[in-house]
């Protein structure tokens, strides 16, 4: 397809996928009228988080790679209320940092969300370990309970309906460790959202959603079904990798990317990762104005021509690989390395892969194909180097944007 034709095609596709950005922005604006502010005033736009009763600003703080307490205080001062972390982030230091900062604020003045993964073993062992990890998180956070507890990284319908997983969440809630529970997901999101509805245990789902997802229409439809069932929807990975290139010379327009997600009124709030004051100010400005300009829309359309760093975890590449390599995991690690500059996160992702050597070295040619056009073999060889870094050198990595 000729470049100009391809550009027109992508522009049309992006409009359709987003529910026609120009049309919905007016709709979203009018829907917000009365209960929210418009650009120029200082009150944040808020939305209800499903049936939880929480009323949250549309942009909050993903703390994942932030290690500066002043940034959390600044986010509170900017009107952000919810702080999203996880048991595993920065090997627990992320929760500890949040705990130290938030101890200075009234408990009712913020909403804290964390995530705990399901381990391996018998059902009884998994439940015991899960609750034990929640207790460790609570100690780090210096709290008796969190507002939202997610089962971390639910990646399929089967996993979402796993009785052991469901029991973990039920017990966490029944014992008062969490006010609300749910899933976090960045893979097979529509299936996981439907499982959240079907399983009946979830109050909230934290889902990957962004303008780079080829399957955005099906994510949006599943979000609608979940929201109709009273589940609160929180969007993550809204920045789609933060940069389009490894050299980080082409940043994602983060305001446009956030606004794209927020045109869908079923998304209650978002948690972009924030690691700098500049980035905080940019994200916080969306809290008072979600109107998408022509320029912002065009910025997303133009850049959508490029493959970028964001791997949508669609697994289409895997069938073509003659060795069945976990390519999506390598590509996720690649995004963490170059988009987020978080080698610790990349290392943790790579540790999910059993084989330690580069699987591509014995291939004459690559038979796998990425729908985004990623040079798979080249990126696998590149990111494979992160595995060689000793763990003690990774403790303080993580200073990018997302
Ligand atoms: S070069 Fe790597 S990704 Fe490509 S087919 Fe071989 S093992 Fe799979
Ligand atoms: S590498 Fe490409 S094809 Fe494979 S999961 Fe990621 S986006 Fe999909």
Image (cartoon, grey):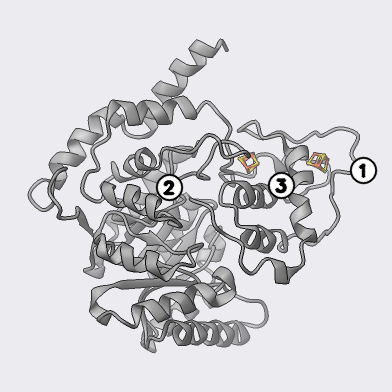
The percent position of residue 387, horizontal first and vertical second, equals 77, 59
- In primary-sequence order, the first of circles 2 and 1 is 2
Closest to the camera, between mark 3 and mark 2, is: 2
**Left or right, 51 with reference to 91:** left
Closest to the camera, between mark 2 and mark 1, is: 2
- In primary-sequence order, the first of circles 3 and 1 is 3
Q: Which mark is residue 362?
A: 1
Quarter of the image for residue 193 reads bottom left
Residue shown at the point (28%, 47%) measured from the top left: 286
Residue 126, above or below 85: below
Residue placed under numbered mark 2 in the picture: 238
Q: Is the residue marked 3 within 8 Å of ligand 2, measured from its CB?
A: yes
Q: Nearer the viewer, residue 335 or 185?
A: 335
Residue shown at the point (23%, 29%) measured from the top left: 23
Q: Is the residue marked 1 within 8 Å of ligand 1, measured from its CB?
A: yes
Labelled pair 2, 1 in contact (Cβ < 8 Å): no
**Left or right, 151 with reference to 352:** left
Quarter of the image for residue 375 reads top right
Residue placed under numbered mark 3 in the picture: 327
- In primary-sequence order, the first of circles 3 and 2 is 2
**Cα gap from disc 2 to disc 1, whole angstroms:** 37 Å
Residue 237, above or below 317: below
Labelled pair 3, 1 in contact (Cβ < 8 Å): no
């Amino acid at each position: 397809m000729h470049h100009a034709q391809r550009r027109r095609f992508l522009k049309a596709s992006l409009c359709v996928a987003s529910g026609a950005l120009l049309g919905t922005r007016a709709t979203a604006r009018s829907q917000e009228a009365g209960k929210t502010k418009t650009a120029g005033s200082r009150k944040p736009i808020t939305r209800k988080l499903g049936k939880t009763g929480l009323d949250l600003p549309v942009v909050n703080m993903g703390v994942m790679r932030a290690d500066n307490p002043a940034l959390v205080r600044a986010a509170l001062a900017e009107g952000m209320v919810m702080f999203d972390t996880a048991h595993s982030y920065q090997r627990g230091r992320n929760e500890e940092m949040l705990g130290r900062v938030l101890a200075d604020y009234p408990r009712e003045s913020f909403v804290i969300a964390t995530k705990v993964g399901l381990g391996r073993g018998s059902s009884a062992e998994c439940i015991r370990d899960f609750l034990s990890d929640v207790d460790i998180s609570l100690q780090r956070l210096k709290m008796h309970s969190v507002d939202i507890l997610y089962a971390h990284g639910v990646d399929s319908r089967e996993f979402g309906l796993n009785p052991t997983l469901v029991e973990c969440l039920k017990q966490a809630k029944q014992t008062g460790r969490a006010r609300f529970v749910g899933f976090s997901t960045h893979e097979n999101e529509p299936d996981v959202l439907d499982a959240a509805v079907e399983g009946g245990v979830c109050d909230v789902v934290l889902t990957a959603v962004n303008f780079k997802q080829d399957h955005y229409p099906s994510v949006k439809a599943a979000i609608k079904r979940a929201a109709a069932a009273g589940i609160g929807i929180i969007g993550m990975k809204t920045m789609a990798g933060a940069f389009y290139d490894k050299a980080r010379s082409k940043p994602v327009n983060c305001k446009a990317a956030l606004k794209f997600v927020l045109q869908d009124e079923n998304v209650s709030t978002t948690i972009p990762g924030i690691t700098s004051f500049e980035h905080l100010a940019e994200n916080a400005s969306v809290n008072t104005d979600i109107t998408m300009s022509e320029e912002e829309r065009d910025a997303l359309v133009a850049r959508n021509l490029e493959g970028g760093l964001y791997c949508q975890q669609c697994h289409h590449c895997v069938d073509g690989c003659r060795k069945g390599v976990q390519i999506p995991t390598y590509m996720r690690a690649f995004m963490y390395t170059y988009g987020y500059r978080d080698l610790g996160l990349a290392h943790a992702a790579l540790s999910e892969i059993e084989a330690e050597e580069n699987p591509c070295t014995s291939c004459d040619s690559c038979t796998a194909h990425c729908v985004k056009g990623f040079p798979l073999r080249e990126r696998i060889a590149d990111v494979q180097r992160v595995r060689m870094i000793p763990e003690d050198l990774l403790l303080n990595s993580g200073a990018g944007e997302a």
